[in-house]
Image: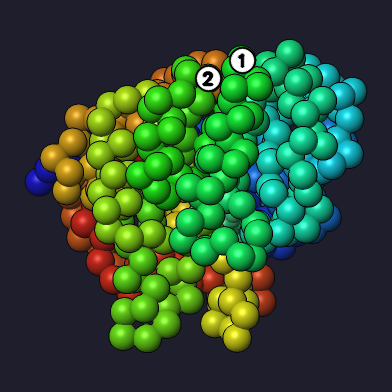
């Protein structure tokens, strides 16, 4: 029986939601990750330090006290985020970054940034106070093809931004394209990227296999196979600019199986197992620990974890659904096998 031991990983991009749902989802992450960067796209969004710290308290309250798990909070940037808020956030022990959602790009992004130039003073302050900027990198113009939105964002926004703020630490979140991997590799050392399990495992055919597949719909949307292989190459290369961020984003079944279904894939139930499958298929299991446990911490300037986890090569079947407030959430690979299993600590 094959087993591997890894330094306990962190999830550098996670949606936990709020209220009763927190209780349903937080422990899936807490059982495998030591820390997670928590996305602020709640309704209303987490735009102030007070909102972030009270959200942090609710997460800690919802978590199983037997599990060690530290939520690392982020603030949601709007057109009006003040320089003072950035300064206070940079000094605050619970806040680790700010998230840029171009307005209209995804779930609860309506209050996001309408025009990037409007927030240049905010970015200037983030650069000065060394607060990382996390980016949902897609243009939102309806005339741009949905599959081209990431590539256009690089040309139109991200390229100029990295030139204007060369010392700003940027995480290009959930990259989905070859252009994304190339941009990160070619740009300075202050830019890194997270990569999700779904973008490493699936191409856009998975949205239409035998019919429309709402549980494979996320944003940025899955891309063609050549992009998936570019992402696998980047993730498994051992290059420290690429690290784990699941973008696990649960929505109730009725919000996914809907005439206008929400974007988001729930993967927290099996995240590290899914990544292990990917690295094994690529013949790069030796590169998994860096991607999952070292490079993100190094980029954020945080200590690496010291605890360990153990995975066994063992097939198990993902449940068809998990409880989600008064409903269900359909997990990634529902009803299908996964070939690695995280063993209890
Ligand atoms: O698929 C996604 N779901 N992409 C995002 O950017 C947001 C997320 C969510 O919050 O549901
Ligand atoms: Zn996300």
Taking 27 as reference, is 227 left or right? Answer: left
Q: Label 1 belongs to which residue? A: 167
Residue drawn at (69%, 41%), measured in percent from left and top? 100
Taking 148 as reference, is 95 left or right? Answer: right
Callout 1 secondary element: loop
Whichever of labels 2 and 1 marks the residue nearer the N terminus, that label is 1
Decide: few, some or many residues near mark 1? Use Cα within 10 Å; few <14, some 14-19, many ≥20: some
- Residue 60, given in percent of the width and then of the height, sits at 68, 41
Front residue of 337 and 49:
49
Q: Label 2 belongs to which residue? A: 190
Taking 152 as reference, is 40 left or right? Answer: right
Which of the 4 quarters of the picture holds residue 129? Answer: top right
- Residue 224, given in percent of the width and then of the height, sits at 33, 60
> Does residue 266 appear in this view?
no
334 to 71, vertically: above or below: below
- Residue 311, given in percent of the width and then of the height, sits at 26, 43
Ligand 2 closer than 8 Å to label 1 CB: no
* Scheme of image coloration: rainbow
- Residue 269, given in percent of the width and then of the height, sits at 44, 57
* Quadrant placement of the C terminus: top left
Quarter containing ligand 1?
Answer: bottom right
Distance between the Cα atoms at labels 2 and 1? 6 Å
> Does residue 277 appear in this view?
yes
Which of the 4 quarters of the picture holds residue 53? Answer: top right
Residue drawn at (38%, 59%), measured in percent from left and top? 223
Q: Are marks 2 and 1 in contact (CB under 8 Å)?
A: yes
Residue drawn at (53%, 54%), measured in percent from left and top? 149
Callout 2 secondary element: loop
Front residue of 143 and 79:
143
């Amino acid at each position: 029986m094959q087993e591997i031991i890894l330094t306990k990983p962190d999830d550098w991009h996670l949606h936990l939601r709020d209220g009763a749902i927190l209780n349903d989802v937080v422990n899936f992450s807490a059982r495998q990750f030591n820390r997670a960067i928590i996305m602020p796209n709640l309704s209303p969004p987490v735009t102030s330090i007070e909102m972030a710290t009270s959200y942090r308290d609710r997460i800690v309250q919802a978590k199983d006290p037997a599990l060690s798990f530290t939520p690392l909070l982020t603030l949601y940037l709007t057109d009006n985020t003040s320089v003072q808020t950035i300064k206070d956030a940079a000094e605050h022990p619970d806040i680790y970054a700010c998230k840029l959602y171009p307005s209209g790009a995804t779930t609860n992004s309506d209050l996001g940034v309408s025009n990037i130039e409007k927030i240049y003073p905010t970015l200037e302050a983030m650069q000065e106070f060394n607060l990382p900027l996390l980016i949902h990198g897609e243009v939102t113009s309806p005339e741009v093809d949905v599959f081209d939105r990431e590539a256009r964002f690089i040309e139109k926004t991200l390229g100029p931004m990295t030139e204007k703020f060369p010392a700003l630490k940027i995480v290009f979140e959930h990259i989905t394209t070859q252009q994304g991997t190339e941009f990160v590799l070619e740009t300075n050392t202050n830019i890194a990227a997270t990569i999700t399990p779904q973008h490493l495992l699936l191409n856009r055919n998975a949205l239409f296999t035998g019919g429309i597949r709402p549980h494979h719909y996320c944003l940025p949307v899955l891309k063609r196979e050549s992009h998936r292989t570019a992402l696998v190459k980047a993730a498994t290369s051992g290059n420290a600019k690429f690290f784990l961020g699941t973008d696990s984003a649960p929505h109730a079944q009725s919000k996914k199986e809907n005439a206008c279904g929400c974007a988001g894939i729930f993967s927290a139930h099996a995240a590290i197992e899914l990544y292990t499958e990917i690295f094994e298929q690529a013949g790069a299991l030796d590169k998994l620990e860096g991607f999952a446990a070292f490079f993100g911490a190094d980029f954020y300037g945080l200590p690496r974890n010291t605890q360990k986890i153990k995975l066994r090569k063992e097939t198990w079947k993902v449940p068809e659904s998990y409880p989600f407030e008064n409903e269900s959430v359909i997990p990634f690979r529902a009803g299908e096998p996964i070939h690695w299993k995280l063993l209890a600590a």
